[in-house]
């Protein structure tokens, strides 16, 4: 039996007016926010999916369905906390997480450190185990046209 597991997660949400833009648990001043049942935090959703995927536990929609009213508007950090609890219950620990947010605007560099701190604090991890990066798509595709924001995340788990 392998004592290491790798997981990958991906999420995307549409940008719309009259919503807060929340990424990595940080509210970012911007004219639009992400549309979703919860707070639509694509970064945290991608991290959750990577953790769940590493153990073949399905995805965030399976564990926190948008058909369930208790998750309406929920802070995605609570979903991340519950995901981490599930990982620990299964006898695994998080070694590291590497995530990338894909957005043409707004500029995310000033918020990256706060995103990293939010994720490490929720997961109870040392700061050097979580990487968050941001990139654009040079005006290509739906993210490049400013229609939405996407995020990818990978994680490494080890048997506790």
Image (spheres, rainbow, N blue to C red):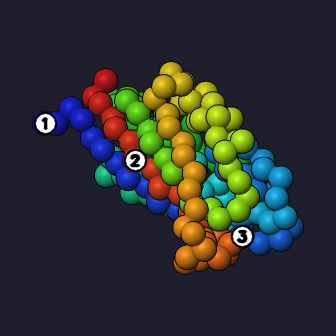
Do callouts 2 and 3 mark residues in contact (Cβ within 8 Å)? no
Do callouts 3 and 1 mark residues in contact (Cβ within 8 Å)? no
Q: Residues within 10 Å of mark 3 (few under 14, many from 20)?
A: many
Image disc number at residue 117: none
Is 126 drawn above or below residue 67 in the view shown? Answer: above
Q: Quadrant of the C terminus?
A: top left
User: How far is mark 3 from mark 1, CA to CA?
Assistant: 43 Å
User: How far is mark 2 from mark 1, CA to CA?
Assistant: 21 Å
Badge 3 marks a residue whose secondary structure is strand
Give the image location of residue 77, x and y in percent.
64, 42
Q: Is residue 46 visible?
A: no
Front residue (pair 28, 4): 28
Is 144 drawn above or below residue 117 in the view shown? Answer: below
Q: Residue at x 82, y 59 (%)?
A: 30
Quadrant in the rendering for residue 139? bottom right
Which residue lies under the disc numbered 3?
Answer: 15
Is 136 drawn above or below residue 1 in the view shown? Answer: below
Q: Residues within 10 Å of mark 2 (few under 14, many from 20)?
A: many
Give the image location of residue 140, x and y in percent.
55, 76
Badge 2 marks a residue whose secondary structure is strand
Q: Quadrant of the N terminus?
A: top left
Q: Residue at x 16, y 36 (%)?
A: 2
Which residue lies under the disc numbered 2?
Answer: 154
Q: Earlier in the sequence, mark 2 or mark 1?
A: 1
| Number of numbered markers | 3
Q: Is residue 143 visible?
A: yes
């Amino acid at each position: 039996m392998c004592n290491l597991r790798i997981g990958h997660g991906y999420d995307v949400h549409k940008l719309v007016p009259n919503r807060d833009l929340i990424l990595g648990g940080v509210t970012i001043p911007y004219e639009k926010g992400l549309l979703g049942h919860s707070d639509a935090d694509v970064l945290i959703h991608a991290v959750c999916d990577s953790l769940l995927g590493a153990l073949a536990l399905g995805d965030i929609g399976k564990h926190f369905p948008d058909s369930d009213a208790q998750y309406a508007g929920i802070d995605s950090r609570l979903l991340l906390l519950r995901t981490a609890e599930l990982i620990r219950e299964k006898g695994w620990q998080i070694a590291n997480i590497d995530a990338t947010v894909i957005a043409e605007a707004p500029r995310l560099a000033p918020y990256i450190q706060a995103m990293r701190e939010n994720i490490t604090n929720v997961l109870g991890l040392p700061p050097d185990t979580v990487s968050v990066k941001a990139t654009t798509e040079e005006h290509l595709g739906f993210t490049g046209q400013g229609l939405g924001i996407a995020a990818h995340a990978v994680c490494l788990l080890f048997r506790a």
